[in-house]
Every structure is written in structure tokens, then in C-alpha cells.
Amino acid sequence: MNDTLALVVTSERTWPNLATYCFNENFLRYRPQFDLAVVLNGPNDAALQSIAKASPDFVFVRPNYGLDPADFDFLLKRIPLDYEYYCLLHDDHWFHPSDWFLQLRTLAAGHLQVDVFGNLVRSNVQYHPSMDGLSKLLGYDRYSPDDVPFFIQGMAGLYRKAAINTLLSLDGIPHLHRNVIPVAWLAERLVTAMLWKRGHSFMQIPPGYERFLRHKNHDPLRDSAYTPSTPR
């Protein structure tokens, strides 16, 4: 058992992203140095065959509903919580540097005060007032986008055990058992606010937004990125 677990979410429709993005050469190069858990939304034999190529330690297949926040919540409540680090990834997130794992662990070792490393997006990006209503519907009206100047893109990134334990103590990652995309957008904001209010610190992975941990083929969105002068 390694001290780092990568958690990857995919689906019966999006699983080809794994070969193109998440399970790229850079990811597989370091595969012996971390454990891997994958959840597949919806049964699909071809997807399971593709997942098997990465030799996962845990594989779950669940009904295709709830989108990525529900998948992350599902995984965190079913895998062993004995790891020091948890790397949350969608099937279309991928690491650009060839030595990504070494760089990421070196970053964490050099910033012991930081609990979450990822891509930080300004809190006013893609926000719609209806999200306030969704937050109340989910029972999270005590959290507001105004609480935090940023949110972590897609909840993807490296989390220390303390941050994961905090989320689980607050009943895990907010979600619905339905495929409601605005709820998925809201979840990444709520997860950030939940951890922020509990005193956890965040840091943009250098050298900048989507330059280390990439999302599909998107170019860095400079107007969306948030880079605090000091980690918080």
C-alpha cells in the first residue's frame, strides 16, 4: 500500500477520455508509487477493459446518475482512509510534466501549511443566482460564494488526509442522485467553502492555472485563474 491514492471518476459515455487524458504516459509512469481507485458511472465492458490497463486497486460500477460530485462522495465513503494524500481526478484531467508525481509530492512537502493543491478559479466565474437556491435546497445555505475568493476547479487536485477527514465529518461531498449539471458546478464551490471555513489552506499548483494539471485541451484561462500572493 502506498501513501497516496488517486481517485478517478468516469462514465459509460466518457471513458475514452482515460486513454487520451488521465491515463496518459506521464500518469502511468508513476503508477507503482500510488494506489488507484476508479468509479464507473454505468456498466460498460469496454470501459472496464480500459480501466484494467491501469491496474486499479479498487474499481466500482454504479448507476449513471449523480455526476462527478456523487462519484467522489461514493469513493471516499468506500475506500480505506489510511492514505496521507488523495488525488481527485476526472477522466479528462491530466498532468503535463513528465515528473508530475515527484513535483506534486515535493510541492506538498515544501508547503506543510497547505491542505489542497489544484487549479483555483475566481469565485465569480460561471456563477448564477439560482445557485443560491440550489445551495438552500441541499441544506448548505450557510455557505456563500462570497465566503471564498476562489473555488477549486472540478474538485481536482491533491488533498491531505486532514482535508478529506473534514469533508467526511460534514457528510462528504454535496450532490444529488440526479444528473443536474448546476449542482455539480455548485459542489466544487461548496467543497471549497466547507474546507475554507474549517481553516484549511489552498494553493494553486505552479506554474499556474491549467499549466500543470490540465483539463482536456483547454488553453489556460488567464481571466478565470486566481493566484493568491500567499497560500490560503
Image (tube, grey):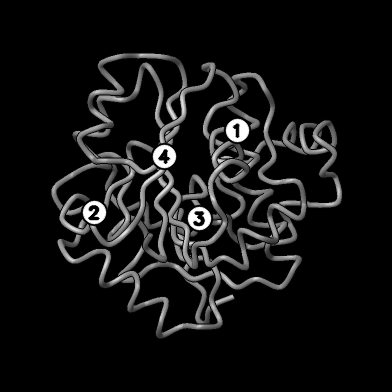
- Secondary structure of the residue carrying tag 4 is strand
Is 155 positioned to the left or the right of 92 in the image?
right
- What amino acid is labelled 3 in the image? Val
Relative to 191, does residue 139 appear above or below in the rendering? above
The first of marks 3 and 1 along the sequence is 1
Q: Which residue is mark 3?
A: 121
Q: Are marks 2 and 1 in contact (CB under 8 Å)?
A: no
* C-alpha span from label 3 to label 4: 30 Å
Q: Residue at x 41, y 14 (%)?
A: 43
Q: Residue at x 76, y 46 (%)?
A: 171
List x then y, in percent, for residue 17: 27, 30
Q: Which residue is mark 4?
A: 58
* C-alpha span from label 4 to label 2: 14 Å
Q: Which residue is mark 1?
A: 70
Relative to 114, does residue 3 appear above or below in the rendering? above
- Secondary structure of the residue carrying tag 2 is helix
Mark 2 vs mark 1, foreground winner is 2
The first of marks 3 and 4 along the sequence is 4
Q: Are marks 2 and 3 in contact (CB under 8 Å)?
A: no
Taking depth in this image into account, of 56 and 20 the one nearest to the observer is 56
